[in-house]
Image: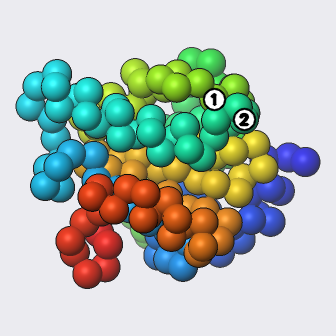
Amino acid sequence: MALTEMWQQRWPACPPIGYMLRDWYRDVWVRFHSLPGSKRYADDENEYAVILERYNTVLDELFASKDVYVITSAWTAEPDVPEHQPDADYWQTLLTQDDPDPEFRTYSHLFAARRPWQHGCVDALLREVADYKTAGVLIADARMERIYHPYDGGADVLLPTAEERDRLRDRHSSWLSSHPAGL
């Protein structure tokens, strides 16, 4: 089954844009913060170690011994697909910001790579996310049932059921936000 078809079967209300998923699928969504006290950015290597450990702990729980898709984005003001990302294939282009003025339109070009999950296998990418050098990353199992969306400051996780989400949330309750909406 093609990647787009799998996405549309599992997540039909929303395109594969990480920051949009929580609004459409709040019933199976949970957010974890990367650093204690909801601190957003690391100041030293010890804090980077905490960030990567938290990212990888959840990723291991979701994807151990499975293949995953690592989906990355490139944003442009033009619909033309930019050069391919290293080790990834072009998937699709989405108009993410429509505007009557073409100078203010934004396109998200998605690239996907399938690989076996191994602890630490995307650490370089996760560190770029943590530093806000890249964004729009999604990591999903090969059937698109579990989505991991890291961002600078944490990660959004979407799971097949609210029960599975609750179990994961409860295992890492100290990483949750104190914000009433979970943000």
In-front residue for pair 62/18? 62
- Whether the residues at callouts 1 and 2 have beta carbons within 8 Å, the answer is yes
Query: Residue 173: percent from the left, percent from the top?
Result: 33, 62
- Dot 2, crowdedness within 10 Å: few (<14), some or many (≥20)? few
Question: Seen from this angle, which residue lies furthest left?
Answer: 43
According to the image, label 1 marks what residue?
A: 117
The answer to whether 64 is drawn above or below residue 7 in the figure is above
Query: Residue 106: percent from the left, percent from the top?
Result: 44, 54
In-front residue for pair 105/10? 10
Residue at left offset 26%, top offset 81%: 180
Identify the element where label 2 is drawn.
Answer: loop
Residue at left offset 72%, top offset 35%: 66
In-front residue for pair 73/75? 73
Q: Amino acid under label 2?
A: Lys
Mark closest to the chain's N terminus, 1 or 2: 2
- From where the camera sits, is residue 162 visible? yes
Query: Residue 182: percent from the left, percent from the top?
Result: 32, 72
Q: Amino acid under label 1?
A: Trp
Position of residue 112 in the picture relative to residue 167 (left or right): right
The answer to whether 112 is drawn above or below residue 101 in the figure is above
* Quarter of the rendering containing residue 135: top left
Q: Which mark is residue 66?
A: 2
Residue at left offset 17%, top offset 55%: 38
Tell me how the rendering is colored. rainbow
